[in-house]
Amino acid sequence: MNYNVVPITSRQIIDGIGLKILDVATFSLKRGYEIRQSGRMPNKCEVVVFSLGSYENRERFTELSAQFALARDVTELFMLNDCALLACREMGLNLAPVGTIDETGVPEGRSLLLSVPYFH
């Protein structure tokens, strides 16, 4: 599985980007209910979002920053699978991935931010 790498600045953290991504869980349940009410079965995929702060695994964070030529004000990386990126876009949260890494490239020391089913 590949993960879309999204750089996050301290300004975005202050503005609540993490909380907005967590809203995907509520959005998914509401969306699944609405689809079922319309008489059809929703498609389902699994949302997975990892987070890596510059303080969690400094060495790997620095490597990824160099690999994707990230700006100096990036303090965190979100790694979203394709389902998570779809859910965020359908919710109106347009994140800008700078590239992808495969499952083996997801660093140790990362945090699991979200893992929920998504109905669409």
Image (cartoon, grey):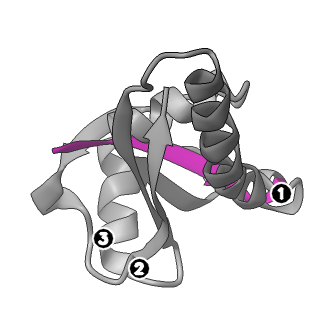
Up-down relation of residue 106 to residue 46 (above or below) = below
3D distance between C-alphas at marks 3 and 2: 6 Å
Q: Rate crowding at label 1 as few (under 14), some (14 to 19) or many (20 or more) other CA atoms within 10 Å.
A: few
101 or 20, which is in the foreground? 20
Please identify, in this view, whether the residue under mark 2 or under mark 1 is nearer the observer.
1
3D distance between C-alphas at marks 2 and 1: 23 Å
Question: Quarter of the image containing the N terminus?
Answer: top left
- Which stretch did the figure color magenta? 1-11
3D distance between C-alphas at marks 1 and 3: 24 Å
Three-letter code, disc 3: Arg
20 or 27, which is in the foreground? 27
Q: Which mark is residue 16?
A: 1
Q: Residue 118, image x and y in percent?
A: 47, 41
46 or 65, which is in the foreground? 46
View extreme (right): residue: 15
Residue annotated with mark 3? 60
Q: Quadrant of residue 108?
A: bottom left
Q: Quadrant of residue 13?
A: bottom right
18 or 13, which is in the foreground? 18
> Helix, strand, or loop for circle 3?
helix
**Majority SS type along the magenta span:** strand
Up-down relation of residue 59 to residue 51 (above or below) = below
Q: Is residue 69 visible?
A: no
Residue annotated with mark 2? 58
Q: Residue 112, image x and y in percent?
A: 44, 72
Mark 2 or 1 closer to N-term?
1
Q: Rate crowding at label 3 as few (under 14), some (14 to 19) or many (20 or more) other CA atoms within 10 Å.
A: some
Q: Let me know if residue 2 is in the magenta part.
A: yes
Residue at the image position 88 percent from the left and 53 percent from the top = 15
